[in-house]
Amino acid sequence: MKSEIKTALEIQHEPVAIILTDEKPEDAKQFKEKRWGCVMFMLAAAIKGQTAVFDRNTYGCQGGGTGLGFGNQYKNFPGGEDCFCYFLSTGNENWPAGREAGEQVKPYMREEAFDDFMKGERYIQDPELVKKFIECLPIVDLPVSYVVFKPLKKVDKNRERPEVIVFLGDMDQISALTILANYHRETNDNVIFPYAAGCQSIGIYAFAEAKSSMPRAVLGLNDISARLAIKRLLKKDLMSFAVPYTLFEEMEANLPGSFVERNTWYQLRGIR
């Protein structure tokens, strides 16, 4: 499958199709069972041409399992969901059960990860607000066995129907994608930018939009942990733009005759 948007916007990185399926693709990259890994590693691999697959035992981390649609995996965080609430906020060294959990997991964690576990990532002010954050997530337990990341160019449109298409672009390209998402709509709020983990922006938030009769795109990578991973892997300062498949088809169809054929876009990109 080819994206005319990628060509018109001169997007360097191959768009990634997210496919929900009960069929495990052959020769796909996959995390080892119950081992830590960041979903962004697999997104980068798909951008570079590989297929990646996740299931309920190989989602990499609890945030990733939640973000990919395998239910509320924060319940399986070391020390339980309460420890996650302290981890994302003020740190587990501040309460007895957290300190005890820290001693149990210390032998299995990298020094940097253990420091975050104990002192907190400080992404949300306090544990009670982290609980509210979790409540606001569109958590879903998908009725399929696998979530697949696949380069869009390798998708067979006659056999596969992606749930979401993910673009990674610079701010000019993200601006252009935002215009395209709104170009044919009667409203001007057809892109959302929720605060979430990088995997949740391309996963459950986009999956929830895909169920809508008027799905919106999801701008992502406001998660600085995910940004750091992507920047290390792709050497670029990028944002994600997750498009439910029906909206992707609309945007592709509406590309001809739009701003991509006009002087402002040419000047912005130095085309003419």
Image (cartoon, rainbow, N blue to C red):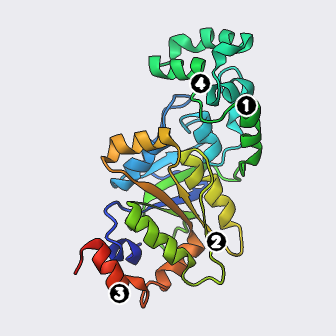
**Mark 4 residue element:** loop
**Mark 1 residue element:** helix
Classed neighbour count for the residue bearing mark 4: other residues with Cα under 10 Å, few (<14), some (14–19), many (≥20) = many
Mark 4 and mark 1: Cα distance apart in space = 18 Å
In this view, the mark in front (2 or 1): 2
Mark 4 and mark 2: Cα distance apart in space = 34 Å
- Residue at image point 39% right, 48% down: 44
Q: Mark 3 sits on what residue?
A: 262
- Residue at image point 55% right, 47% down: 199
Q: Nearer the viewer, residue 190 or 210?
A: 190
Mark linked to residue 120? 4
Q: Earlier in the sequence, mark 4 or mark 2?
A: 4
Mark linked to residue 189? 2
**Mark 3 residue element:** loop
Mark 2 and mark 1: Cα distance apart in space = 33 Å
Q: Earlier in the sequence, mark 4 or mark 1?
A: 1
Mark linked to residue 254? none
Q: Which quadrant is the N terminus positioned in?
A: bottom left
For the residues labelled 2 and 3, say whether their Cβ atoms are less than 8 Å apart.
no
**Residue 155 seen in this snapshot:** no
Q: Is residue 35 left or right of residue 75?
A: left
Residue type for callout 4: Gly
Image height check: is 6 above or below 93?
below
Classed neighbour count for the residue bearing mark 1: other residues with Cα under 10 Å, few (<14), some (14–19), many (≥20) = some
Image height check: is 89 above or below 227?
above
Residue type for callout 2: Asp
**Residue 135 seen in this snapshot:** yes
Classed neighbour count for the residue bearing mark 3: other residues with Cα under 10 Å, few (<14), some (14–19), many (≥20) = few
Residue type for callout 1: Lys
